Amino acid sequence: MIGYIRTILISMTAVLVLALVLTGCSAGEPTNTPASVDVKTVETTDAENRRSPASVFSKATGVTSKDRQIALNVTPSTVTYDEFFDISIDGLGQGGVIPPGSLTVEGVKLQIPGYFGVAGEIPRGGRDGGVTFSTKVPANTESGTRELVLTLPNQSTASTSFNFHGASITMSDTEPAPNQKITIVGSLFSPLSAPGRREGMRTHQISGQETSVVSLNGMALHAPNVDYPIMIDRLGTFSAEITLPAALIEDESKIQVVDTGGRVGNSAFHIANPHVDIQPSDTYPGETLVLNGTGFPARNDIGNETSAVDVVYSYVIDEGKPTQHYRHVDLGQVAADEHGQFSWTSAVPEQARIPSNNLIVFTASSGEPLAIEHGIPGPVISVEPVRAYSGSDIAITLRGQHTGYVLPPGAVTLGGARLDMPGYFGVAGTKPTTDDLGEVTYRTNIPKDVLPGQKWLVFDLPGGGELYTSLQILEADLSFTPDAAVPGQVITVESSGFGVSGDASSSQGARSKIAGEGDSYVNLDGTKLKPPYVDYPIEITADGDLAFELRLPIGDPLLGKLAVEIEIIDTLGRRGSGLIYLSQPSVYIFPTESDRGSTIFVIGMGFQASPERKAKHQVDLFYGEHHMGTAYTDEEGSFESDFIVPADISAGVSYPVTAKTTDQTLVVEHIVPSRYLSVVPNVISIGEALTIRGAGFLPFTKVRLTLGAYQVAPPIELSTDRFGTIEVIVDVPESIRLGERSVRIWVHDESIQTTVEVID
């Protein structure tokens, strides 16, 4: 009896030793979906069970040390503050209990009913070995996906995860600068109804005392970086300004807020890294730089740190040599604004070399110095506009030269042609001379004889070497109506925007014309056209519009060509060009097969045009050796004609149909069929008229016709005409037998036949 009592006391002592004080509360947004389960068990062999007596714990709880599958579920899967949620445990065993401290959320012990004043009965396994009970999540649980872990004394464990919808913080700037003052807004913090308010507090707050503080990377913030207390309204929301001390800033930082109700909210953020954008990128010594900085220590009104940034220009000496080193020029000091940004201008030190790769160093009150590369380019040449017509004005700029350098005459060429330079050889203006920054711009004119295309503009450097840039010499596009024509035809030539480059040019919009003198002509494949082919002058509007008529020459200039180029040059030397395609001559006949005596229609196109009545262009037509007549082309080089196939040709032979001019001959074939016999219609009723036709016979020859057994006997004697053709119409006799009947023609002792279907 005494031993039994001792055993009971030992068991109770073991339970008390295992119990731990539990804190916190929980709430939930109910759903019907249990969280997923991750189960882990520790196996004990039967031999070990036989060797090991039941432990004090197993005697007290009913859970013995043997293999058991423990399952853990949470319902609902998303919970929040001050609301109960259900925990279901399967595999506990009948009568088994959940000891205190065995359930934890992220290492924090969860309250279990029946222990340490928590309402409810101690959870015990039912007949099926399972148990379900309700509890709350501790108030200091952080928002997000959390893990619930069950650890039993026999080392069996199970875990599952759930979503905790807790306090959260948003920041007014998600990538702030060091020392920057930002606004944080908290939600779902302890409302008026939440427990834990101290005496005298109307609502919960972030008090600044003990654990109820705002912290940055684990370090509590105090005045002047934050003013306490931060009051939380009745719904659990607050707003406060805080300053982010540069000394506590890390690349990956976190703000944490704990209120007097124990609720915790976090916000992770990246700190803005210092950066400076330098514009423009191709500055020379003495020219102005614009420096735009971000991510530097910000200016604030608490005065604990400075936002000043020292700027030093380090220019290289002996670049690329073993003796390479830097010399430093203090550019001054700039202060970042309340966002850690600045915009500042400074000149590139005149001591810097051309070309060179240098550094601009920015040193703030905290953090490492920031070095930004700044390259000074070599000398360059540029031109405006970059697209222009021959004869147009252009502006040439040289940069990166020595101060006071006078450009020598002939130093600049375009496509190999030397350009005029002010101050030399009678050209008006002063000689181009570089200014204090080593830069000079002067205007000149593109020579009229520079042909269209991409050209190199070249400057010969003093002491050797060259600078290059490109200039596109434009030419206008010409359009033609029609877009294909023939020699002698009059076409309309048009252009829109002639001489307008779309870039700045002093000659753009200048009035000009195509004069018909000097170099200002309309050219056809390089040959100047004069009246009567073109009437000069051709006026060009200020908007670059022009239109004129042009008659294409006849003869050698166009003979055998598929297209020719038409080019215009105005009095300013500007050019335009286009290709006009030449229609090639062709002849068509209809029909292509017919009898002697039939009419053939002939159509010709692409021949020399006849624009004037007095200068008609003649086309002779031949059938074989027979001259069939003459046709004349119209103003577009086309003609139409017809003739009768001669009688004195053989049947069953093809003959050439020829269209011939003084310089062109075109031939097509026409076929005269062999002798044949035909009837119309080929199905006929008794008493109806039947047309019988035969062709290809000798002319003026007597013939005999039969229809079935009947001889066709018209009132006159039957014979072929002068073309060897015969045609007769007869009535089908009533006495003829029905069905297919033969129709036969006899010429001398020869005959040919066909058939006709006779119906009732």
Image (cartoon, grey):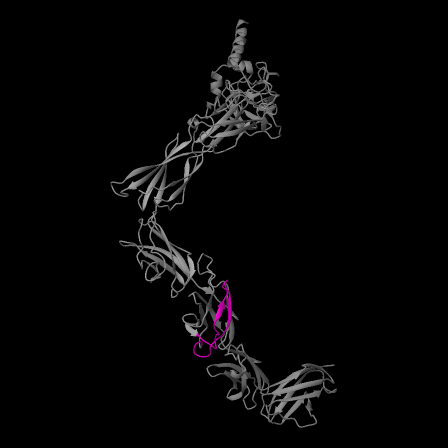
Q: Residue at x 64, y 92 (%)?
A: 704
Q: Is residue 44 left or right of residue 701?
A: left
Quadrant where the N terminus is found in the figure: top right
The image quadrant that residue 318 belongs to is: top left
Picture layout, residue 141 above or below residue 717 = above
Q: Is residue 451 left or right of residue 80?
A: left
The spot of residue 252 in percent (x, y) is: 45, 31
Viewer-side residue, 649 vs 651: 649
Picture layout, residue 41 above or below residue 613 = above
Classified by dominant secondary structure, the portion drawn in magenta counts as loop
Please provide the residue range marked out in magenta.
529-558
Viewer-side residue, 153 vs 497: 497
Viewer-side residue, 164 vs 334: 334
The spot of residue 114 in percent (x, y) is: 59, 15
Picture layout, residue 295 above or below residue 213 = below
The spot of residue 624 in percent (x, y) is: 51, 87
Q: How many marks?
A: 0
Q: Residue at x 67, y 81 (%)?
A: 682
The spot of residue 753 in percent (x, y) is: 62, 86
The image quadrant that residue 136 belongs to is: top right
Residue 138 visible somewhere in the drawing: no
Residue 613 visible somewhere in the drawing: yes
The image quadrant that residue 697 belongs to is: bottom right
